[in-house]
Amino acid sequence: MVMRKILLVALAAVAMVSCSENEEFENGSTTNRIQFGTVVKTGTKALVATTENFSAFTVSAYKTTDVMGPTVQLSTGFMDDVEVTKPSAEWQYAGNYYWPISGKLQFFATSPAQTLDITTAAGYPNFDYTVKAVADQEDLVAANVIDQVKSESAISLPFQHLLTQVNFTIKGEVADFIYTVSKLVIKGAKDKATFTFDGSSTVGAWSNLAASASGVTYEYAGSPVSVTPTTAEPDASAAFETSGNALFMLMPQDDLTGVTLDVTYTAAPKDKSSEYTWNDTKVVTLTGSWGMGKNIRYTLTLTNNATPIKFTPKVDTWTDATGTFTGL
């Protein structure tokens, strides 16, 4: 199910502004320091961000005269790629950042850090992203808060999950068989796109979806996963991902045309587990869509492909015969 765990943390900015900055900023008192709070919304092997493990993000702030919009040209120089971490109980970052006397601040944050592009075109920042190999996949989150002016309250950065969790569960069709999956391979999914912020509560959207190379695949080849339904428990199931993780963290896409799943598994009677009735790979066509920030779970019902040994007894009829005896 879609994860909806809320993360609230406090972040206080520290240090003083330099003399050259004092001409543009008010006195560097505690009430003038820029403060942040974060909210991770709508949760999506990659570790899924939670209250306990969210420990770093990178934020940039751009100062503008006008309210933010598609024709506003952002420029660097205010807060550029500032890393915020939580080495202990308190969030910390290095630098001297205070509210300006005039103008508005536009905040954009990502975790892990991404390279924001503000020079190619006016308007909101964007960044390119390519989904990593399975072993290195990550939960990518981002937030934006626009048109902010001096406030003694912390700026709340509502982080949204930008990718899609794709998870799998297996079930068995016939009771008292053990079904063991050794490999899952997703083929045909696009893995590269451009994310553009939009200043809204949904943060932004993906565009320019494409495949970064020919034949991109995502493979699970970890420990085999087994399930054994019984007459008492015919709907027994087993999931591949561990708690707090996603099996695959993939690029959202509305059209799954051409996306398939190879499932390599064995099936055997549970009391003769080496006597396989199936030991091969089947191809499944995936359907639906992968929405941003969604947890998609496919349940695979495996068949045993067993052909029962049958007997049809037949007893031949007696053949009548006659005999002749002579010389008695």
Image (spheres, helix red, strand yellow):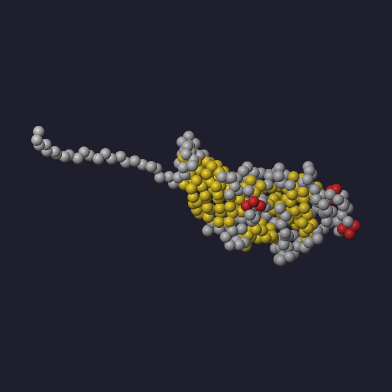
Side of 180 where 17 appears, left or right? right
Side of 255 where 73 appears, left or right? right
| Quarter of the image where one finds residue 1 | top right
Q: Position of residue 102 (x, y in %)?
A: 82, 58
Residue 208 to residue 305: above or below: below
Q: Position of residue 181 (x, y in %)?
A: 53, 46
Q: Residue at coordinates 72% horizontally, 55% vertically from top-left?
A: 113
| Quarter of the image where one finds residue 127 | bottom right
Front residue of 53 and 108: 53
Residue 215 can be seen, yes or no: yes
Front residue of 88 and 77: 88
Q: Position of residue 301 (x, y in %)?
A: 49, 45
Q: Residue at coordinates 53% horizontally, 53% vertically from top-left?
A: 261
Front residue of 316 and 49: 316
As drawn, the residue found furthest toward the left would be 327
Residue 301 can be seen, yes or no: no
Residue 61 to residue 234: above or below: below
Quadrant, the C terminus? top left
Side of 316 where 242 appears, left or right? right
As drawn, the residue found furthest toward the top would be 328
Side of 110 where 101 appears, left or right? right
Q: Position of residue 129 (x, y in %)?
A: 66, 58
Q: Residue at coordinates 78% horizontally, 43% vertically from top-left?
A: 88
Q: Residue at coordinates 46% horizontally, 36% vertically from top-left?
A: 231
As drawn, the residue found furthest toward the right would be 19
As drawn, the residue found furthest toward the bottom would be 120
Front residue of 239 and 273: 273
